[in-house]
Amino acid sequence: MGAIVLHHFLFTERGISVSIQVIREEEEFQKILSETSKFLLMKHSLTCPISGAAKAEYDAFSAYSSVPCVVLNVQEARSLSNKIAEDYGVKHESPQVLLFDGDNVIWNDSHGAITENSLNTAVKS
């Protein structure tokens, strides 16, 4: 088995620093599951403007969240995206955010419902 490389990006969005972990491989996803009790995963389309707007909301939320935020770009990791949908019984959509608590998806939403406020509410419940 090859080495697992987790990609972290730190950039400025709307004047705030945002740290996002991007995953592409199942091993990366499994590592996060085993090491993190609660995290958000965004399935993001690199070509969809609706997904771009949802990603801006996700980035704004991640700038202050204590809950780790992870991104899966569906064009780069379609098989992983499909496997997560199948394994967790959550129909694939893009954009889509899933909140994991342990090995369970306890919340998910998609498209225009992905807002900084909805993410904040989801992690607090």
Image (cartoon, grey):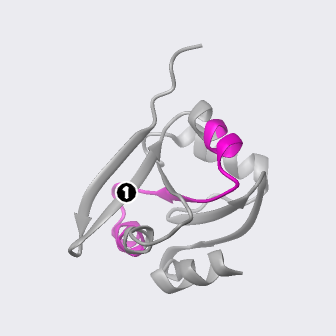
User: Which residue corresponds to the image point at 41% horizontal and 67% vertical from the top-left?
Assistant: 51
- Residue at 53% across, 67% down: 66
Q: Nearer the viewer, residue 85 or 65?
A: 65
Inspect the image, locate mark 1, and give the three-letter code of the amino acid beneath it: Ser
Front-lying residue, 71 or 82: 71
Secondary structure beneath dot 1 equals strand
Height in image: 83 above or below 1?
Answer: below
Q: Is residue 68 above or below residue 26?
A: below
Left or right placement of residue 102 versus residue 39 in this view = right
Residue 5 % position (x, y): 45, 29
List x then y, in percent, for residue 93. Answer: 58, 62
- The residue lying at 63 percent from left, 63 percent from top is 98
Magenta region, residue range: 30-57
Q: Quadrant of the C terminus?
A: bottom right
Residue of label 1: 19
Q: Nearer the viewer, residue 118 or 123?
A: 123
